[in-house]
Amino acid sequence: MQIKGFVPTSFVDWDGKVSSVVFLPGCNFRCVYCYNIDLILYPEKLKTIEFITIKKHLLENKGLIDGVVLLGGEPTIHNDLPDLAKNIKALDIPVKLDTNGYNPDMIQNLLDNNLIDYVAMDIKAPLNEKYSKVTGVSIDLEKIKRSIDLLINSNIDYEFRSTILPSLHSRTDVIEMAKSIKGAKRYFLQQFKKERTLNPKFENARQFTKKEFESIKEECNKYVSTKLRI
Ligand code: SF4
């Protein structure tokens, strides 16, 4: 796998922690509101960073960071993801995985081999035909359900999270999404960023207001402890 981005210090990619962030190319989804366009569609345009460079930085700054976040794109599409996680864990540095949850076999592998310490998994839509509409690809919902079960029954810390916007998610949809992870440790509802999006129609899409977010959160809280990132 080629590493296509590295942020040495981030305060926003692992709640409560200072992290370094590694960006991996490609994705098996085509979410209409995705803003990682070059990373998922044209990774060859981006400079490749050798792991040895990242390793040097991590070793030099070990006392200053709490962990490394692996994100994409979608990291789990890379068969050698466990090797990358293993190389970071070998430095005695915790690893967080950000994933869309569409490769439960890979998540299982990483969990079984103690290669990840925290997982943030996206819930893109209610577990029905809307999942394909939001992700832009034909979805086998069983894979999403399996990843949800894996995390809820795992021994590591995790979160589920959803980026929501009114043109894609009704209030009922979001409540259904919360129901689909009932009993999970935590759920974050996130504001959609108005940026260049994969489907240009969404670049200026309306965002939920703070009041709407608060009201939806209250409903979701009946099923899973829900917080806002807005
Ligand atoms: S937003 Fe969707 S398409 Fe973009 S990187 Fe995440 S899962 Fe892939």
Image (spheres, helix red, strand yellow):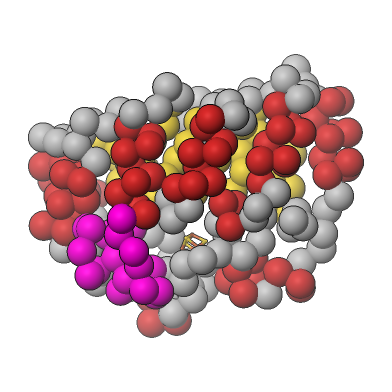
Q: Is residue 207 visible?
A: no
Q: Is residue 1 visible?
A: yes
Side of 83 where 10 appears, left or right: left
What is the span of residues highlighted in magenta in the rendered image? 124-142
Q: Residue at x 16, y 58 (%)?
A: 173
Q: Residue at x 30, y 49 (%)?
A: 145
Q: Residue at x 76, y 33 (%)?
A: 87
Q: In the image, residue 103 lies at what x, y percent?
A: 48, 53
Q: Say if 40 sits above or below 120 in the image.
A: below
How many numbered discs sit on the rendered protein?
0
Q: In the image, residue 90 lies at what x, y percent?
A: 76, 25
Q: Nearer the viewer, residue 200 or 94?
A: 94
Q: Say if 208 sits above or below 118 in the image.
A: below
User: On the image, which quarter does residue 220 sit in?
Assistant: top left
Magenta span includes 43: no
Side of 149 where 75 appears, left or right: right
